[in-house]
Amino acid sequence: MGEVRKRKASAEGEQAKSPENVVVQKNGMGFFSVVFVAAILAGSGCQVLKKDQAVEFDAVRGLAAQLKADNVKTLATIATMQEGVEAKDTIIKRLQEEVTATHEKNALLKEELKLLNELIETTESSLKANIEANYQDQFEELKAQAKKYGKVEKDLLKAGNSVEELEEKLSDLQETVRKSSDDNDARSKSITDLQSELDLAKTETASKLIQLHELVSTSGVDVEKIDGQAADIVKVQHTLAVLESKLNEESLKIVELAENDVTSDISALESSIQAQKTAVENLIGALANAAKAEDVAKISALTKEIQQAIVNVEESKVSKNAVGPLRNEFETAITQLQKTVNDIAESAKSSDAKFTTELAALSSVLESLKNAPESKTEP
């Protein structure tokens, strides 16, 4: 603005000075001619001009004409300069307007910059607040995740301890199954021995029955009734044979279970144990049917009837010396048969109680193992 004002002042000064340079044309002699003539007149005392001075006057007139021509050119130049000054003033005015508009724009720009700075400050404070809030939230979430991680780590350690305990229990279970297998082998051997004794008793009983049949046939005793009783005894013996076969099958299954690696597949172990439990329950049911009270009572009744038949034979004319030893041997065979049935029933009950205890322990171990993953996944 200072430069513009300075230029404008200089332009106004030039305009003020420009009228002084204008040469005014007047009729007659010019300014220099008049002065020159006045000087000559003053020096010569208004004497008549000499002839040689006429030449000088012609030169002066030529100079005046030249000056007039120069004045015309000067006027044209001054007019051109005036036009340039006017154009310059127009340019200066336009520049002033542009500068004023620029100042206004600068003022608007400053206002917008001020608003922008305020917006930046507001946005920055808002961002800082949001970042701080998010940081606090994420920090709290991170602490919560750390707590959860610590809890999961404890659960994993606990689960690892549970797995170790489970492995120990499974090892104990394997040992128990092996012992049970050994017991079953011993029991199977005992059953085999009993079966041999039973077969021997059956053979001896059959021979004694033949002898008794012969004695009874000679004494008038009901032979058909004695045959029926003998058939019942044979049925009981057949039932004992079936029970022995089932016991052998269960012993083989228990041996196979003992040979398997139960720690590798808990699901297979559980299903196998459930199958063993079902088989043992069926075996116990069969043994219970074989050793139930009515069968024992039936055998006792048969014994009493046979004893009564022997008494009837003794009361007949048959020799008591022949009947006495036969009666004693038959009673011994019946007593041994009852003892065999009772021993099998007691052995089955004892094995069932022991196996039931083992199954209960294994079921509790499997249940704790199933609950362990659930406790780990809890939040």
Image (tube, rainbow, N blue to C red):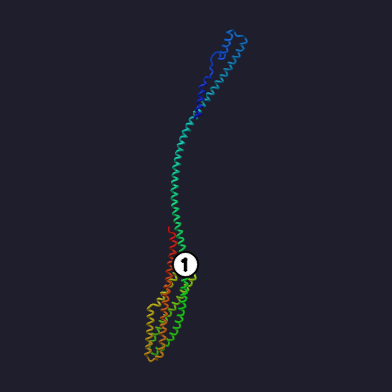
Which image quarter holds the C terminus?
bottom left
Q: Is residue 142 above or below residue 319?
A: above
Whole-percent x and y of residue 59? 61, 14
Residue occupying image coordinates x 46% and y 34%: 107
Residue occupying image coordinates x 40% and y 78%: 291
- In front here: 289 or 48? 48
Whole-percent x and y of residue 5? 49, 27
Q: Please tell me in which quadrant of the rendered image residue 52 appears.
A: top right
Identified by mark 1, the residue type is: Glu
Q: Is residue 292 above or below residue 328?
A: above
Q: How many numbered dots are placed on residues in this image?
A: 1
Q: Please tell me in which quadrant of the rendered image residue 58 appears.
A: top right
- In front here: 86 or 360? 360
Whole-percent x and y of residue 20? 52, 19
Residue that label 1 marks: 168
- In front here: 135 or 83? 135
